[in-house]
Amino acid sequence: SQQGEEDPQALSIQEGENATMNCSYKTSINNLQWYRQNSGRGLVHLILIRSNEREKHSGRLRVTLDTSKKSSSLLITASRAADTASYFCATDARNTGGFKTIFGAGTRLFVKA
Amino acid sequence: NAGVTQTPKFRVLKTGQSMTLLCAQDMNHEYMYWYRQDPGMGLRLIHYSVGEGTTAKGEVPDGYNVSRLKKQNFLLGLESAAPSQTSVYFCASSYAWGGYEQYFGPGTRLTVT
């Protein structure tokens, strides 16, 4: 089963509104990353938050991490039509024999102009 | 600086045919990955490599083989294609694991009939 699960699966908002996406995971992690994927393209890294961090900012992005609840959220403020994309969380965790990076199924964001 | 490139971009195979997907990166990254992306399931790791000459199994390795003869190249082979391998395949690379972003190629859309 997927380690990271995004919620909601799809989100439609007006330009200028804020968009919040959530990611839940099951086991302890080292890091959590958020990626964006435009239709038909590869994933692009947005932001990384380490397990000992609670919040990070990058431009209009704000990411929070609550390790006690095993959840993270991505907030995009003042959304633009160009933010229309799918957003994925990815968790990094060590396991016996190596490591695992597991991607969630993604949230599809549609920003209406 | 091209980043991560993949060839081909599209391919249609008949059941039982074989093919090789090529991934190349020019960032001198040690780690390289092959993922498949299916609707509603996010990305799943097929195989990965932690350096030239090394390969390891990911989450869904069955039916695939890989080779990393040169640091900049990571090949994914399908020896006998099956319809269940119809998917979009992404290659990625990173400097290391655990706190380092992955850089993705544009993807290869494979259809097996």
Image (cartoon, coloured by chain):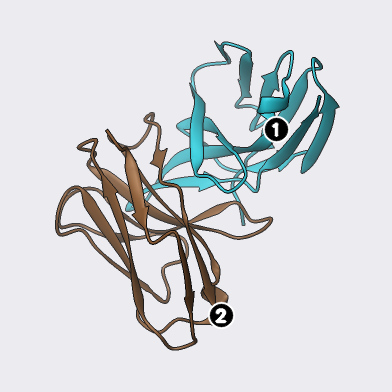
Chain colours: A cyan, B brown
Q: Do the residues at discs 1 and 2 belong to one chain?
A: no
Cα separation between marks 1 and 2: 31 Å
Q: Residue furthest bottom?
A: B16
Snapshot quadrant of residue B58: bottom left
Residue A91, x across and y down, in percent: 52, 38
Q: Is residue B48 left or right of residue A24?
A: left
Left or right of B18? Residue B31 is left
How far from the left and from the top, in percent, is residue B6?
36, 53
Q: Viewer-proximal residue, B103 or B53?
A: B103
Discs 1/2, front: 1
In-image side of A35 versus B50 (left or right)? right
Residue drawn 41% across the image and 46% down it: B105
Report which residue position mark 2 lands on. Answer: B83
Task: Give percent across and percent down for residue A14.
Answer: 85, 23
| Quarter of the image with the N terminus of chain B in it | top left
The structure residue drawn at horizontal position 19% and vertical position 57%, both measured from the top left corner, is B54
Q: Is residue A61 above or below residue B90?
A: above
Amino acid on which the number 2 mark rests in the picture: Pro
- Residue A31 drawn at (x, y percent): 47, 30
Residue A55 vs residue A67, the one in the foreground: A55
Instruction: Indicate whether B49 appears above or below B85.
Output: above
| Placement of the C terminus of chain B among the 4 image quadrants | bottom right
Question: Residue B68 appears in which quarter of the rendering?
Answer: bottom left
User: Residue A84, labelled with which disc?
Assistant: 1
Disc 1 on helix, strand or loop?
loop
Q: In the rendered structure, find residue B43 and report the number of the disc placed on it.
A: none
